[in-house]
Image (tube, rainbow, N blue to C red):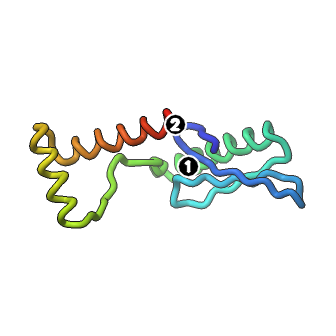
Amino acid sequence: MMEYKGYFAKVEFDDEANIFHGEIINLRDVINFEGETVEELRKNFHDSVEDYLKFCAERGEDPEKPYSGKFIVRVDPELHKTIAIQARKTGKSLNAWVNEALKNITQQSHTR
């Protein structure tokens, strides 16, 4: 994975063509780039992000933010009840409780 200005790219290597292919993965728009070396790939990734930001500015549009901080999760009603009760027991809103639980899970996965 590569990251630049909050935009993330997944990279694959094409052994037959001897070239790296990258795609920005946290936008609805499709933005691809490539390079024969890591340095060229990184430069082209940065250039692609800058071109995207420039294009948005020229059109008078705000660039798509990679993440808004909101997402909808559908869960089983019993799980919903259980986590709502746990949140109330700790004096937190359901959103705050789930946010903390997700942070804890993420931190645990980074320490493994």
Q: CA distance from mark 1 to mark 2?
A: 45 Å
Task: Indicate the position of residue 40 as horizontal and vertical percent values.
Answer: 80, 41
Question: What secondary structure is found at the residue carrying circle 2?
Answer: loop
| Res. 89 mark | none
Image coordinates for residue 80, horizontal then vertical, percent = 19, 59
Q: Which mark is residue 112?
A: 2
Kindly indicate the quadrant of the structure image that contains residue 5.
top right
Of the pair 4 and 111, the residue shown nearer to us: 111
Seen at 18% across and 48% down, the residue is 94
User: As shown in the figure, which amino acid type bears the numbered disc 1?
Assistant: Glu
Q: Is residue 95 left or right of residue 25?
A: left
Badge 1 vs badge 2, beta-carbon distance below 8 Å: no
Residue 105 in the image: above or below residue 32: above
Q: Quick one: label 2, few (<14), some, or many (20+) residues within 10 Å?
A: few
Say above or below: 52 vs 78: above
For image coordinates 67% across by 40% down, the residue present is: 46
Residue closest to the eye, 47 or 68:
68
Q: Earlier in the sequence, mark 1 or mark 2?
A: 1
Residue 2, by quadrant, is top right
Judged by depth in the image, the label closer to the viewer, 1 or 2, is 2
Q: In the figure, 32 relative to 110: above or below?
A: below
List x then y, in percent, for residue 95.
Answer: 22, 46
Left or right: where 18 falls relative to 111? right
| Disc 1: which residue | 58
User: Dot 1 surroundings within 10 Å: few (below 14), some, or many (20 or more)?
Assistant: few
Q: Position of residue 108 (x, y in %)?
A: 43, 37
Q: Amino acid at mark 2?
A: Arg
* Local SS, label 1: helix
Residue 82 lies left or right of residue 110; in this view the side is: left
Q: How many marks?
A: 2
Q: Say which residue appears at 69% left-offset and 44% top-offset.
A: 45
Residue at the (70%, 51%) spot, across then down: 11
